[in-house]
Amino acid sequence: MYQIEGSGQVLRSRDKRARLRLTRPQVSQVVLMLGLTSMFTDISSEMVSSILPMYLVLNLHLSPFAFGVLDGIYLGGAAFVRLISGFLADKSRRHKEIAAAGYALSAVSRIGLLVVGGVWTLLASVILLDRLGKGIRSAPRDAMISLSTEPEKLGTAFGVHRAMDTAGAMIGPLIAFGLLTLTPDSYDTIFIVSLCFAVIGVGVISLFVQNPPNVAAKADEPAATPSLRAALSLARDARFGPLLIVGGALSLATMSDGFLYLTLQRRLDFNVGLFPLLYVATALVFMLLAIPMGQLADRFGRARIFFGGYAVLLAVYALLLLPWYGAAQVIVSLVLLGVYYAATDGVLMALASALLPEDLRTSGLALLTTVTNLGRLAASALFGLLWTWQGMSVAIWIFIVGLGVATLLTGWLFALPRHRGAARGI
Amino acid sequence: MAVANETVTAPPVATDARRRRVLFAALCAVCVLVAGGFIAWAVIRDGGAGSSVGGPIGDGGAPGSLAGVSGASGALMFQNVVSGDYWNQVGLVPMGHPEGSRSMMPLRCRRVHFAAGRGLCLAEGNGPPGTYAAYIFDSDLRVTGDVDLAGLPSRTRVSPDARYGATTAFVSGHSYAEEGYSTQTLLIDLANGKELANLEEFTAYRNGEAFANEDFNYWGVTFTEDSNRFYASLGTGGKTYLVQGDIAERTVEVLRENVECPSISPDNTRIAFKKKVGGDLAGPIWRFHVLDLATMAETPLAETRSIDDQIMWLDNDEVLYGDGQDTWEMAADGSGQPRRFMSKAVSVTVVDGMGEADVASSPAGQAGDVLTLPETDLSVSVDVPETVTAGVELTYNVTVTNNGPHEATWLVVDAYLPEDAQFGGTALVEPVNMDHGCSYFEDEDRVRCDTATLAAGARWTFAVTVTPRAEGPGAVWANAGATENDPNPANDHAEATFTIGP
């Protein structure tokens, strides 16, 4: 499906033709291999996370409140670890090695699941290990995608990666539930198969991914290593700083998918057992559109597509308040939600990559991801409170207004002269 | 690639690339072999698909299934969680012999309850994996109907006259941890096998006024003798309430705050429940209490661990509750100590006598197979030094001995510290290379140490260090238990009292 090109020169010679078509995305082998790594790792992790509640509650007879603990551990730990690993990757210029260590940590946690059984304290550490691995690897991986891609193709590269990543997230639960049908209740089988996928993922990154040449070349120049002060001052950078604000503001006004589905369910009163299907439908649209949206972003401007993505999300929220309801509303909402993800998730990373200096790329991406994740967490808590105190409609109205303001702020910041370049996708 | 081949470094690069590809192919081959081999082994081990899905097994029950096992004095029904062929199968033991041989019934459940000839069995549904249903069954263990559940089974109860049933499920969704958890509680008409209502459809009142919130969650129904009235928990705005419901009127009325998973006593005078007494990052901390409905007085029960379960009354004086895979028993008036009631059994339910004769210790095998748990006698002792001084470290030994005849597996020892003491740590005394783990539960003054196995005849000693803060009388005690039944449960508990001097 993807044409692999071994050399940047060949890539450039075909550039003009490629710009005219959206069909065959051309990305470097590094991007493709990182996509494969993410796909195998996501198959592995989604296999486990889709059956974890059943395993904990029905097999180990643990209290379901266990989930709350795990999420708390994860959110605190991952944000901190991501910032550290991002800076270390920039400093050591060993993006691949640090990312691979993160993938390996998650693979090791599968062995942990096999051996700890129902010992609660150990189980929590095993799950923490997996989440730490995720925190460690994501920023160096995204930095490698951007450093091995020409600036004008960043959108496409992130699109390809996110499409493969999401494919893995959809395949994982299918395999897990398939195995549960074949051998009911044998969770050890799921953990073993999950471990195998994780090991293959680690194998791909270790054997087929090399640090981008421009990074590797500098690895022997200790004088030029970036300082912590430089990394911290990224937040005040004239071009990257506003993007951080935009990312944070938009995340603060974005309700979680769970709440969006719950709102749809309350309006239409369909069986709550269908929730997993809603996630699948959204992921499917995201997967299918991630590459075309990335290509459109490269062609017509990443800021425009990113802005458009949030306009689509506003439309999804507005749909929730329509006086009439029907199954069509659910389908349209899910498709639009998938469009929103495709237009914003990878595109934001492409936008940021174009603004960040090479030697601080990982730190910057880690900072941005941490800000957006914390923003989403706060938004989720805020929406829950508003829903409880003021009811569903008020909560949605407040989020529509908030998202509208954040989107306008985004448009204004992107329209400033110093951002025109980014808006054009350069 | 043609361009690359013309450069000087081409041959080593090509060789290296080939080496990497070969290595990767080998890695994939190993992974496929391991995964495939394990799946094949699991299929053989578990007897293939369908062997342990929920609901009826094969053709289900036969006439007189329950009467064949239950004597005149009744029986205990439970969900068997001994791993192996009978995993999750419904089992019966004669009343008064909870540790006796288990008669296994052709029904597999995740939660089960039974009363007056009808039962509810929550298990995997007929749809794809991850869907669940409530199966209605009769005394012949034949399934007469089923109702779909919205998620993971949590609680189920049948009214004393078997007219109604109730189920609570955790609403599943990929990320429901994201916004806490939500529940779905259904009332089921057991006569026609149809869903009667989702409790959220009932009209709620508080202090005589209508009470409604978007975030209402109901769970843990318990039915009264007249079966029209019931009690349940209502969660909203971060608080939980005890509600009393009326099925005919389709209403619920808020009675009291901070009551979860109510369970009404057989004489309908008291409600046993879990009360939230604190909470932290590790979730809520609960203690079991009993509420007297006449005086509204609350009595804390003897269990000092935080346990998330809906209590089951054994009779008017004793209650049962599950902790992990075991069921425990304690007095309903707050006196005494909790003790292990059944190992590897959950959802324990009292089934009234329906047989003609009391078959006490020899269950009839006609309704199913008989599973006998291996037995081994554990004993525990606590050795405290002669002088104990306030503000000075006290180190005492806890020793567990397996008197045989079998190896003890999943051995768990709970050592309770003196009240108002600073925990110092634990240390292994003998055997020196024992594979074990210990965790300290601060809010419960308890240390739990566990190990996978202790051979027959073997002894395990560990030391606990604490610093008592105040002078006066002090006490420490320890409980030991394993997967195996204990023919002599009296010595599973040891206690030492002492005086803390200045």
Image (cartoon, helix red, strand yellow):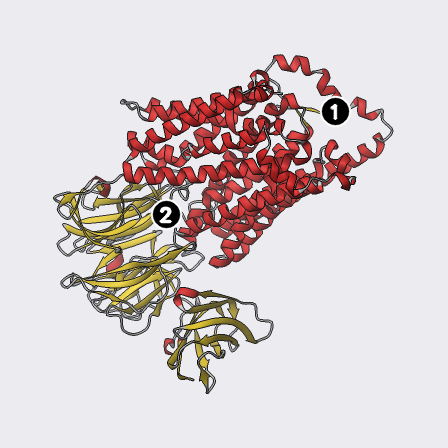
Which residue occupies 78% across, 39% down?
Answer: A221
Q: Which mark is residue B185?
A: none
Which marked residue is nearer to the observer: mark 1 or mark 2?
1
Which residue occupies 49% across, 50% down?
Answer: A73
The location of residue A9, given as percent across then percent down, is 75, 21
The location of residue B112, given as percent across then percent down, is 30, 53
Q: Is residue B24 left or right of residue B444?
A: right
Kind of residue sitting beneath label 2: Gly
The verdict on a common chain for dots 1 and 2 is no
In space, the residues marked 1 and 2 are separated at their CA atoms by: 56 Å
Where does label 2 land, which residue? B54
Q: Quadrant of the C terminus of chain A?
A: top right
Which residue occupies 22% across, 66% down?
Answer: B315
Kind of residue sitting beneath label 1: Ser
Other residues around mark 1 within 10 Å, as few (<14) / some (14–19) / many (≥20): few
Q: Is residue A355 left or right of residue B273?
A: right
Q: Nearer the viewer, residue A78 or A53?
A: A78
Q: Chain of mark 1?
A: A
Q: Nearer the viewer, residue B272 or B387?
A: B387
Which residue occupies 48% across, 59% down?
Answer: A119
Q: Quadrant of the N terminus of chain A?
A: top right
Residue B425 visible at all: yes
Where does label 1 land, which residue? A7
